[in-house]
Image: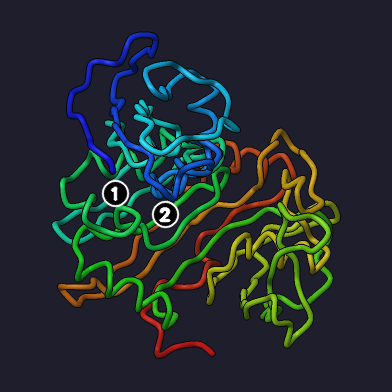
């Protein structure tokens, strides 16, 4: 049996935190003889056992009127429990946070933003607040009713450039479908190590999955592998010399780290991308990747729209320091695709 006490005063000996919630429970017959942490996990299914064990360690649980700090305590039927549920970092992940969003287009259905380097798109381990998702929840009321606050695709923390976000349910569904059908143009600029040895344009169709030897990395897998997904990146050379190559990359799929993995597989890891074999060079210590052009059909109005983003100063300076020249005219056009690319 459980009772929720609103706006609680914490029991004596239990420190309160802003945003905490006090739960009162009574041990039933099935709980007699069970460990405290195990029984709590059965009653409070929205919380992990690890989180509840931490509450016990912190003195946030009372059994029969006294604070206990032993997760292995055996309960007796009829024991009254008080649990002060304190907000965890994960619980704060979906909290609205006001922040400056670099918006380049917005209407009631979508917004397009030019994400800066360092902005995390979605909460995760080590980044439970200060993300784009937190900013979207504060930016407009409708974000709370949408999956991932309307985020339909992501950029890595250290990748800059253009992203589209849905602001309505109809726009969200249409954008997800358009990305799945490969009708959204996403074109990136990347600075890679080494002299280019292939053709001026290369289509890389190599499946991508988790690297079995290093779980933080992705890797190219053999075709037909059950642990990978199909991935295609078109690569076009913009400029190059003996030390570096500047390329434009057109995504047809959106696998995790796709451009980084495919270029490393080609033998040209990105400058600054130490995870995939690159190294800091020409003053650039982060991966040299920028989402420079975005084209899509407006999910509600139906018209084709294209946005361009100028290179960030650090990437532009690295390109120049490498002795290369960026010519935006050599990027693929942002024209509407004729159809899905298989």
Using the numbered discs, state the Cα–Cα distance from disc 1 to disc 2 in whole angstroms. 9 Å
The residue drawn where x is 21% and y is 75% is: 303
Residue matched to label 2? 162
Q: Is residue 273 above or below residue 55?
A: below
As rendered, which of 308 and 264 lies closer to the eye?
A: 264
10 sits left or right of 127 in the view: left
SS at badge 1: strand
As rendered, which of 91 and 337 lies closer to the eye?
A: 91
Instruction: Specify few, some or many for label 2: CA neighbours under 10 Å numbering under 14, 14-19, or 20 or more.
Output: many
Please state the horizontal and vertical placement of residue 109, each as a whole percent of the image.
18, 61
| Numbered label attached to residue 45 | none
Q: Quadrant of the N terminus?
A: top left
Q: Toward which corner of the image does residue 150 lie, by quadrant?
A: bottom left
The residue drawn where x is 42% and y is 16% is: 66
The residue drawn where x is 55% and y is 39% is: 35
Q: Is residue 279 above or below residue 8?
A: below
Q: Is there CB contact under 8 Å for labels 1 and 2?
A: yes
The residue drawn where x is 80% and y is 66% is: 196
Please state the horizontal and vertical placement of residue 45, each as a whole percent of the image.
41, 50
Instruction: Specify few, some or many for label 1: CA neighbours under 10 Å numbering under 14, 14-19, or 20 or more.
Output: some
Please state the horizontal and vertical placement of residue 280, each as a whole percent of the image.
77, 38
Residue matched to label 1? 104
């Amino acid at each position: 049996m459980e009772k929720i006490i609103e706006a609680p005063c914490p029991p004596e000996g239990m420190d309160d935190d802003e945003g905490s919630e006090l739960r009162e429970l009574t041990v039933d017959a099935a709980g007699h003889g069970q460990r405290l942490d195990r029984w709590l996990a059965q009653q409070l299914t929205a919380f992990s056992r690890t989180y509840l064990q931490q509450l016990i360690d912190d003195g946030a649980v009372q059994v029969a009127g006294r604070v206990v700090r032993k997760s292995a305590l055996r309960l007796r039927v009829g024991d009254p429990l008080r649990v002060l549920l304190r907000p965890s970092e994960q619980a704060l992940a979906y909290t609205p946070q006001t922040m400056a969003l670099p918006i380049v287009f917005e209407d009631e259905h979508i917004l397009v933003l030019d994400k800066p380097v360092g902005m995390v798109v979605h909460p995760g381990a080590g980044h439970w607040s200060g993300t784009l998702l937190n900013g979207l929840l504060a930016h407009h009321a409708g974000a709370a009713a949408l999956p991932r606050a309307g985020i339909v695709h992501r950029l890595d923390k250290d990748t800059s450039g253009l992203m589209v976000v849905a602001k309505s349910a109809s726009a969200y569904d249409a954008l997800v479908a358009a990305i799945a059908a490969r009708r959204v143009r996403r074109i990136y600029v990347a600075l890679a190590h080494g002299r280019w040895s292939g053709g001026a344009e290369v289509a890389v169709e190599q499946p991508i999955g988790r690297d079995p030897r290093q779980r933080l990395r992705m890797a190219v897998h053999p075709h037909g592998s059950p642990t990978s997904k199909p991935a295609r990146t078109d690569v076009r050379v913009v400029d190059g010399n003996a030390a570096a190559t500047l390329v434009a990359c057109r995504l047809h799929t959106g696998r995790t780290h796709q451009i980084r993995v495919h270029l490393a597989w080609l033998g040209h890891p990105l400058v600054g991308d130490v995870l995939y074999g690159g190294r800091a060079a020409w003053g650039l210590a982060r991966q040299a990747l920028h989402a420079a052009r975005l084209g899509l059909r407006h999910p509600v109005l139906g018209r084709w729209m294209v946005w361009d983003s100028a290179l960030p100063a650090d990437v532009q300076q690295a390109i120049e320091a490498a002795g290369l020249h960026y010519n935006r005219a050599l990027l693929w056009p942002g024209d509407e695709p004729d159809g899905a690319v298989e």
